[in-house]
Amino acid sequence: MDMKLNAERIRTLREQRAWSQEHLATVAGLSTRTLQRIEAGAAASPGTSLALAAALDVPVAELSNTVPTEESSAGPAADALKARLPSWVMMGLLIVLLVIWFGYTVGKDAALRDNRADVACESDAIDCR
Protein backbone atom coordinates (compact mmCIF):
# COMPACT_ATOMS: atom_id res chain seq x y z
CA MET A 1 0.00 0.00 0.00
CA ASP A 2 1.44 3.36 -1.05
CA MET A 3 1.87 6.09 1.51
CA LYS A 4 1.75 9.83 1.15
CA LEU A 5 5.02 11.50 2.05
CA ASN A 6 5.63 15.07 3.12
CA ALA A 7 7.05 16.50 -0.12
CA GLU A 8 8.11 19.76 1.51
CA ARG A 9 10.03 17.90 4.23
CA ILE A 10 11.84 15.78 1.64
CA ARG A 11 12.71 18.89 -0.37
CA THR A 12 13.93 20.70 2.76
CA LEU A 13 16.14 17.79 3.84
CA ARG A 14 17.53 17.50 0.30
CA GLU A 15 18.27 21.22 0.07
CA GLN A 16 19.91 21.26 3.52
CA ARG A 17 22.44 18.84 2.11
CA ALA A 18 22.75 20.93 -1.08
CA TRP A 19 21.73 17.89 -3.13
CA SER A 20 19.99 18.04 -6.46
CA GLN A 21 17.01 15.80 -7.16
CA GLU A 22 19.26 13.73 -9.40
CA HIS A 23 21.80 13.24 -6.61
CA LEU A 24 19.22 12.21 -4.01
CA ALA A 25 17.60 9.83 -6.50
CA THR A 26 20.97 8.23 -7.21
CA VAL A 27 21.85 7.89 -3.52
CA ALA A 28 18.41 6.40 -2.77
CA GLY A 29 18.54 4.07 -5.79
CA LEU A 30 15.48 5.67 -7.40
CA SER A 31 14.85 7.24 -10.75
CA THR A 32 14.93 11.01 -10.92
CA ARG A 33 11.38 10.99 -12.25
CA THR A 34 10.16 9.02 -9.20
CA LEU A 35 11.70 11.58 -6.86
CA GLN A 36 10.18 14.41 -8.90
CA ARG A 37 6.75 12.82 -8.56
CA ILE A 38 7.16 12.37 -4.80
CA GLU A 39 8.26 16.00 -4.35
CA ALA A 40 5.23 17.00 -6.43
CA GLY A 41 2.96 15.20 -3.96
CA ALA A 42 2.55 11.67 -5.36
CA ALA A 43 2.35 8.69 -3.03
CA ALA A 44 5.33 6.37 -2.60
CA SER A 45 5.67 2.66 -2.03
CA PRO A 46 7.02 1.44 1.31
CA GLY A 47 10.29 0.45 -0.38
CA THR A 48 10.68 3.89 -1.92
CA SER A 49 9.88 5.54 1.42
CA LEU A 50 12.48 3.39 3.15
CA ALA A 51 15.09 4.16 0.47
CA LEU A 52 14.50 7.91 0.78
CA ALA A 53 14.65 7.78 4.57
CA ALA A 54 17.91 5.83 4.45
CA ALA A 55 19.44 8.22 1.90
CA LEU A 56 18.43 11.25 3.98
CA ASP A 57 19.46 9.52 7.23
CA VAL A 58 16.10 10.10 8.94
CA PRO A 59 13.39 7.77 10.22
CA VAL A 60 10.58 6.94 7.77
CA ALA A 61 8.11 8.54 10.19
CA GLU A 62 9.82 11.89 9.66
CA LEU A 63 8.98 11.70 5.96
CA SER A 64 5.34 10.81 6.53
CA ASN A 65 2.66 13.28 5.59
CA THR A 66 2.30 14.88 9.00
CA VAL A 67 2.85 18.55 9.64
CA PRO A 68 6.15 18.90 11.51
CA THR A 69 6.08 20.82 14.73
CA GLU A 70 8.27 23.86 15.19
CA GLU A 71 10.47 21.92 17.55
CA SER A 72 11.09 19.01 15.18
CA SER A 73 11.62 21.24 12.13
CA ALA A 74 14.24 23.32 13.93
CA GLY A 75 15.98 20.23 15.30
CA PRO A 76 17.64 18.89 12.14
CA ALA A 77 18.82 22.35 11.07
CA ALA A 78 20.31 22.98 14.49
CA ASP A 79 21.87 19.50 14.51
CA ALA A 80 23.37 20.12 11.06
CA LEU A 81 24.89 23.38 12.27
CA LYS A 82 26.32 21.68 15.35
CA ALA A 83 27.77 18.93 13.19
CA ARG A 84 29.43 21.42 10.83
CA LEU A 85 30.71 23.80 13.48
CA PRO A 86 33.41 21.52 14.87
CA SER A 87 34.79 20.85 11.39
CA TRP A 88 35.02 24.59 10.71
CA VAL A 89 36.66 25.17 14.07
CA MET A 90 39.15 22.40 13.36
CA MET A 91 39.87 23.78 9.89
CA GLY A 92 40.48 27.24 11.33
CA LEU A 93 42.73 25.83 14.02
CA LEU A 94 44.75 23.91 11.43
CA ILE A 95 45.19 27.05 9.32
CA VAL A 96 46.34 29.05 12.35
CA LEU A 97 48.80 26.32 13.31
CA LEU A 98 50.09 26.15 9.74
CA VAL A 99 50.71 29.91 9.70
CA ILE A 100 52.48 29.75 13.07
CA TRP A 101 54.64 26.81 11.94
CA PHE A 102 55.53 28.56 8.68
CA GLY A 103 56.43 31.78 10.51
CA TYR A 104 58.52 29.87 13.04
CA THR A 105 60.40 28.00 10.30
CA VAL A 106 61.14 31.15 8.30
CA GLY A 107 62.16 33.06 11.43
CA LYS A 108 64.39 30.24 12.64
CA ASP A 109 66.16 30.04 9.27
CA ALA A 110 66.71 33.80 9.26
CA ALA A 111 68.09 33.71 12.80
CA LEU A 112 70.50 30.86 11.96
CA ARG A 113 71.69 32.75 8.88
CA ASP A 114 72.32 35.86 11.00
CA ASN A 115 74.17 33.81 13.62
CA ARG A 116 76.44 32.32 10.94
CA ALA A 117 77.12 35.81 9.64
CA ASP A 118 77.97 37.04 13.17
CA VAL A 119 80.38 34.14 13.70
CA ALA A 120 82.04 34.86 10.35
CA CYS A 121 82.41 38.54 11.28
CA GLU A 122 83.99 37.68 14.61
CA SER A 123 86.54 35.38 13.02
CA ASP A 124 87.41 37.52 10.00
CA ALA A 125 86.36 41.14 9.60
CA ILE A 126 86.80 40.95 5.83
CA ASP A 127 83.64 38.76 5.59
CA CYS A 128 81.54 41.46 7.29
CA ARG A 129 81.28 43.84 4.36
Image (cartoon, rainbow, N blue to C red):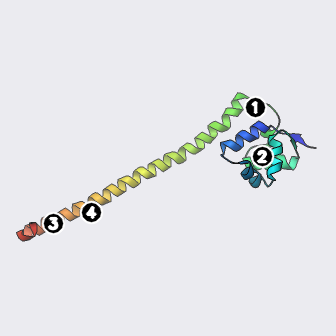
Q: Counting residues from the N terminus, which is met first, the one under dot 3 or under dot 2?
A: 2
Badge 1 vs badge 2, beta-carbon distance below 8 Å = no
Q: Residue drawn at (43%, 51%), measured in percent from left and top? A: 95
Q: Nearer the viewer, residue 67 or 119?
A: 67
Q: Nearer the viewer, residue 57 or 25?
A: 25
Q: Secondary structure at mark 3?
A: helix
Q: Place residue 80 in its image quadrant.
A: top right
Up/down of 108 relative to 69, above or below: below
Q: Residue at x 79, y 55 (%)?
A: 29
- The answer to the question of whether label 3 and label 2 lie on touching residues, with beta carbons closer than 8 A, is no
Spatial separation of the CA atoms under disc 3 and disc 2:
69 Å
> Which quadrant holds the C terminus?
bottom left
Q: Which residue is mark 2?
A: 53
Mark closest to the chain's N terminus, 1 or 3: 1
Locate residue 61 relative to residue 15 in the image: left or right.
Answer: right
In space, the residues marked 3 and 4 are separated at their CA atoms by: 12 Å
Task: Give the residue pinned by disc 4.
Answer: 109
Question: Does label 4 or label 1 sit earlier along the sequence?
Answer: 1
Q: Residue type at mark 1? A: Pro
Label 4 crowd (10 A; few <14 / some 14-19 / many >=20): few
Q: Is residue 63 found left or right of 96 in the rendered image? A: right
Give me the residue at 87% from left, 46% from top. 46
Residue that carries the numbered disc 1 in the rendered image: 68
> What distance separates the C-alpha of mark 1 from that of mark 2?
16 Å
Residue type at tag 2: Ala
Q: Say the numbered circle drawn on residue 81.
A: none
Residue 108 locus on image (x, y percent): 27, 60
Q: Position of residue 109 (x, y in %)?
A: 26, 63
